Image: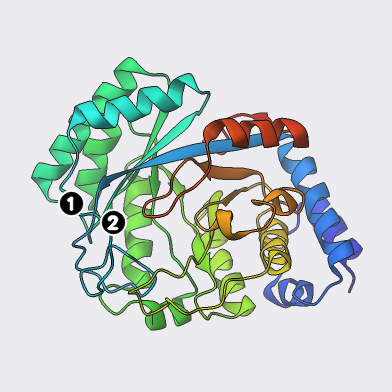
Amino acid sequence: MTVQQLKEKIFSRKQISKPEAMFLTTAPMDQLCPAANEIRKHFCGNSFDICTIINAKSGKCSEDCKFCAQSSHYHTSTETYPLLDTDKILEEAKYNDVRGVLRYGIVTSGKNLTDAEVDKLCNSIRAVTKETSIQVCVSCGLLTEPQFQKIKRAGATRVHNNLESSPCYFQQVCTTHTTAEKVATLKAAKRAGLSLCSGGIMGMGETMEDRIDMVLLQRKLGIKSIPVNMLNPIPGTPYAHNQVLSNEEMCRTVAIFRFLIPDASIRLAGGRGLLPDKGEACFRSGANAAISGDMLTTSGYTIESDLALLKKLGYEVKLQNE
């Protein structure tokens, strides 16, 4: 088995297996990363999907995810506030729209939203879709199919819900909900007619096999937008002292993900600011999407700086995997 052979297998539109993906965990980087970039070019061209997010409801979350500054189980300095009014959500959408961002994620803390909060959110979605050209994505926890149907009718096009890690390892990350509940939520969103976005966090103590198992499940679910977050150890959380991953490990991770889902939007997300090159090497190793601007509880990048980087790399900003 060689990297070249696996690349050719993918070019012939065959899927690689878990053992083949595991082989890539020790493949030479100077072979793996260029091959992943070739696969990206072959299946996605030079399209780059850039999105931004707004922290529309912050803190006091009932869940005990060990990575999260918004969990009520931990003592952090995160600001808390209820679901934002439409005016603020619309203001941020307009700001992103005029700067060339094509997708806008409305993210809320908590296990889910009440029906009243969903109705309020839908009012905001209708305003954004009426007054901007930006696509709306929502990330609101474990909603039900009827709630997703309301969100779809309001004008949203995508739902985000990270698996975070493999089903096996997620039990070490969170005890208040399960991978099975997340999968059921993604399936409910899909039945409601929404496209799906689901990735994970690297650096929580999981193995590369856990990361591969996560993406294999996402492949099975037909998910084509895969956020790749790198853990930003936040004081007050159980992962506060985790070691930050190296640039090389992040490049290897996104390259393997590209081999597993060749036509996906492999999206660098939270933690990118911890990389010495702000993700540039990953964008040469198979990644072709990103979350720009501020993250939920940590700083990101300016939209302008990201657009300049994409121009330097020869990418063209386009919506992908609708």
Residue 1: image location, x then y, percent: 89, 74
Q: Which residue is mark 2?
A: 141
Badge 1 vs badge 2, beta-carbon distance below 8 Å: yes
Residue 296: image location, x then y, percent: 37, 51
Q: Quadrant of residue 180?
A: bottom left
**Could one spot residue 314 in this view of the protein?**
no
Residue found at x 52% / y 81%: 205
Above or below for 230 versus 281:
below
User: Tag 1: residue type?
Assistant: Leu
Tell whether 8 sits left or right of 21: right
Q: Which mark is residue 9?
A: none
Tell whether 190 sits left or right of 48: left
Q: Which mark is residue 113?
A: 1
User: Tag 2: residue type?
Assistant: Gly
Residue found at x 83% / y 48%: 38
In the foreground, 154 or 271: 271
Query: Circle 2 — which element?
Result: loop
In the foreground, 177 or 314: 314
Residue found at x 26% / y 37%: 151
Query: Could you give the CA–CA distance between mark 1 and mark 2, rounded to whole angstroms?
Result: 7 Å
**Could one spot residue 268 in this view of the protein?**
yes
